[in-house]
Amino acid sequence: MLRRPVEVYNQWECWEGCLSVCLSMCIVLMARGAPGQCPTPCHCHGDLQHVICDAVGLKKIPQVSASTRLLNLQRNPLGGVPAAAFADSGGLVSLHMQHCQLRHIATNAFKGLSQLVYLYLSHNHITSIQPDAFRDLSRLTYLHLDHNRISELAKGIFSPLVNLFVLRLDDNKLRQLRPGTFAGAKDLRWLHLSGNQMSTLHAGSLEDVENLAVLHLDRNKLAVYPAAAMSKLRVVEELALGENPMKSIPERAFSSFGRYMEKLQMDRMGLEKMSEEAFAGVTALTSLDVSNNKLRWLPKSLDLSRVTNLTVANNPWSCTCQLAPLRRWMDGNSRKRTDAACASPPAQRGKQVRDSAAFAACRLKPKRSKTAARH
């Protein structure tokens, strides 16, 4: 019987070993997705520019081509974002990682993503974000971190985000904001902090984002209006304070941005009174919601002349001449049928403010026209 020489066997075993290694590498690359290939089992469009891996069971972040612009990783049990997870994906503009069971974001997690504009990390289990997690994200404009479990933000955590425009942190577990939290994010315009557990805003906590246009602080635990922090703001157009246990609003509460504020929400607060000068300096208001409070009248400084959307239901209104400006607004906006019932005096209890005869004898001082006010 003929036998192969020993050296032939050795060559054959060597070749078999190499083949095995190559096959293993191929399997790994197919699972992770080698640069220039569509990761399995994702779907790719536009010559790999859009890579869609929505709910495909991925447990690790796949590699994608540098030409990829959009990567959708939603609804995969990824668990976290390790350092340099996207090192070979420098062309990404939009990254979607909602509902990925993320618990942590490592330092340098997004290293190399200098072109990224949109980053969606909503609806995860993130409790903390490591320092320098957002390094290299100098073009990031939209950052969504809402519906997580973040309880604290490190000073300067957003400092690399010099172009950040919208930041969503609503429905987390934040207890306070400290000075320096938003250092570097000077162009931030929309800040959503609804549904957290904040009981206070420190005096300098908003001084780095004085150009905010939209600020949502509703559904927190603010018992006192944070006047010192709010005084740093200059151009707020929309402010939401509803569902905070705040019983009063102090004088000149909105004066630093009053000529810009168009929309104010203060519903379901248990609000009992507002200083007569609470609205001093507020001249642009078009929408006001003070429903479901304990208000008996509105402050003298509140100018309703530009208001087109007014919600005042479920307050124990005192239908006396002090409330006459509200009745005058209702008479001038009769098509809106604003709901507001009198709680006092006894003869008017239960009657709608718009129908009450209690205001018949009230002398309403006419508003001065803008032309007259200048002379």
Image (tube, rainbow, N blue to C red):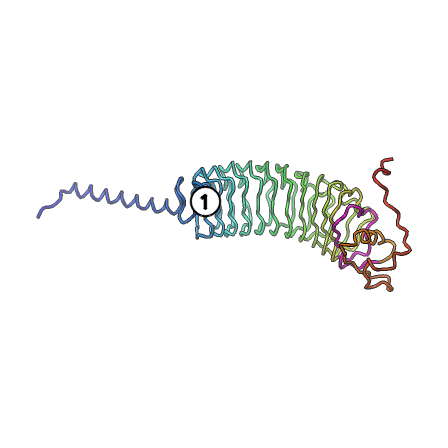
In the displayed structure, 371 sits above or below 243; it is above
Residue 329 relative to residue 167: left or right: right
Q: Does the magenta run of residues contain 311?
A: yes
Residue 2 relative to residue 261: left or right: left
Classify 10 Å Cα crowding around label 1: few (below 14), some (14-19), many (20 and above).
many
Q: Main secondary structure of the magenta part?
A: loop
Residue 323 relative to residue 42: left or right: right
Q: How many marks?
A: 1
In the displayed structure, 351 sits above or below 68; it is below
Which residue is outermost to the left? Answer: 1
Residues 330 and 239: in front is 330
In the displayed structure, 316 sits above or below 94; it is below
The quarter of the displayed image where residue 335 is located: bottom right
Q: Name the residue located 83 percent from the left edge and 59 percent from the top edge.
A: 355
Q: Name the residue located 17 percent from the left edge and 44 percent from the top edge.
A: 9
Residues 281 and 135: in front is 281
Query: Could you tell me the amino acid type at mark 1?
Result: Val
| Spot occupied by residue 227 in the image (x, y as percentages of width and height) | 74, 45
| Spot occupied by residue 66 in the image (x, y as percentages of width and height) | 44, 37
Q: Name the residue located 55 percent from the left edge and 49 percent from the top edge.
A: 122
Q: In the rendered view of the protein, which quadrant contains the C terminus?
A: top right
Q: Does the magenta run of residues contain 182?
A: no
Residues 259 and 245: in front is 259
| Spot occupied by residue 146 in the image (x, y as percentages of width and height) | 58, 49
| Spot occupied by residue 360 in the image (x, y as percentages of width and height) | 89, 56
**Highlighted range, magenta:** 293-318
Q: Please name the residue that numbered disc 1 is placed on.
A: 51
- Where disc 1 sits, the SS reads strand
